[in-house]
Image (cartoon, coloured by chain):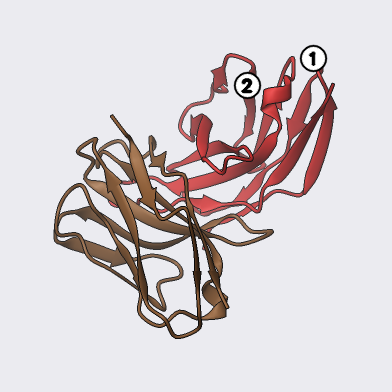
Chain colours: A red, B brown
Amino acid sequence: AQTVTQSQPEMSVQEAETVTLSCTYDTSESDYYLFWYKQPPSRQMILVIRQEAYKQQNATENRFSVNFQKAAKSFSLKISDSQLGDAAMYFCAYREGGGSNYKLTFGKGTLLTVNP
Amino acid sequence: NAGVTQTPKFQVLKTGQSMTLQCAQDMNHEYMSWYRQDPGMGLRLIHYSVGAGITDQGEVPNGYNVSRSTTEDFPLRLLSAAPSQTSVYFCASSYRGRVNEQFFGPGTRLTVL
């Protein structure tokens, strides 16, 4: 079974600085997708960024970027120019590829605090 | 569009009581699913549906029933609530061919005493 591990239960960053959240996963599949979700205190799950395993180029969305190391099965999230609104729980998630695979497997999350 | 809506936002039950958590979406999404989130853990899939009349079990289905009579609605039923079902429940939906773009509802916090 696929597993997703987030080894940092909590992280903190100063406003305007950069922080990297770690995620590793275990799978024997070659076709899969990886995601970072943000969950602010409102509880709403918000998709931040996603990466297709077949793409070598790291995904980027404005201040958010990933470092996808397929051989190492590592998928870290870098947040640049951190803002107070970035404070939230961040979840790494995995989905096996294929048209009938719908399940998202989540890590336990990393709580990010942004200090002013 | 209202997106994915869930009712109620909060609920307290006694052990053995039954209830239904409601989930609705107005985006004509074929795929809908239910997750539970427990403290210190990520979300775990309970049940999912790929269209009206079609449901299947996820990772933690025991104690929960679902049905999908319409595209819009996907209720989750607890037939006999147990304290172990205390959790936050999330509903999600997407187009069947765009499962990488799932929209989540705001969640229902359920406490079973």
**Type of amino acid under label 1:** Ala
**Type of amino acid under label 2:** Phe
**Residue wearing tag 1:** A16
Q: Does residue B53 appear left or right of residue A87 in this picture?
A: left
Report the residue at 72% width, 39% height from top.
A22
Q: Which picture quadrant has residue B37?
A: bottom right
Report the residue at 28% width, 65% height from top.
B56
Specify whether residue B19 is in view: yes
Report the residue at 81% width, 19% height from top.
A15
Q: Is residue B6 above or below residue B102?
A: below
Which residue is at the front of the view, B109 or A92? B109
Q: Which picture quadrant has residue A38?
A: top right
Q: Is residue B37 above or below residue A92?
A: below
Q: State the CA–CA distance, disc 1 to disc 2.
A: 13 Å
- Give the label on residue B102, or none: none
Residue A74 at x, y percent in the picture = 66, 40
Q: Does residue A10 appear left or right of residue A96 in this picture?
A: right
Element carrying mark 2: strand
Which residue is at the front of the view, B101 or B12? B12
Residue A91 at x, y percent in the picture = 61, 43
Report the residue at 64% width, 59% height from top.
B41
Nearer the camera: disc 1 or disc 2: 1
Residue A27 at x, y percent in the picture = 54, 53
**Residue wearing tag 2:** A64
Q: Does residue B83 appear left or right of residue A87 in this picture?
A: left
Q: Earlier in the sequence, mark 1 or mark 2?
A: 1
Q: Tell me the chain of label 2.
A: A
Specify whether residue A8 is in view: no
Q: Tell me the chain of label 1.
A: A
Residue A88 at x, y percent in the picture = 67, 36
Element carrying mark 1: loop
Q: Residues within 10 Å of mark 1 (few under 14, many from 20)?
A: some
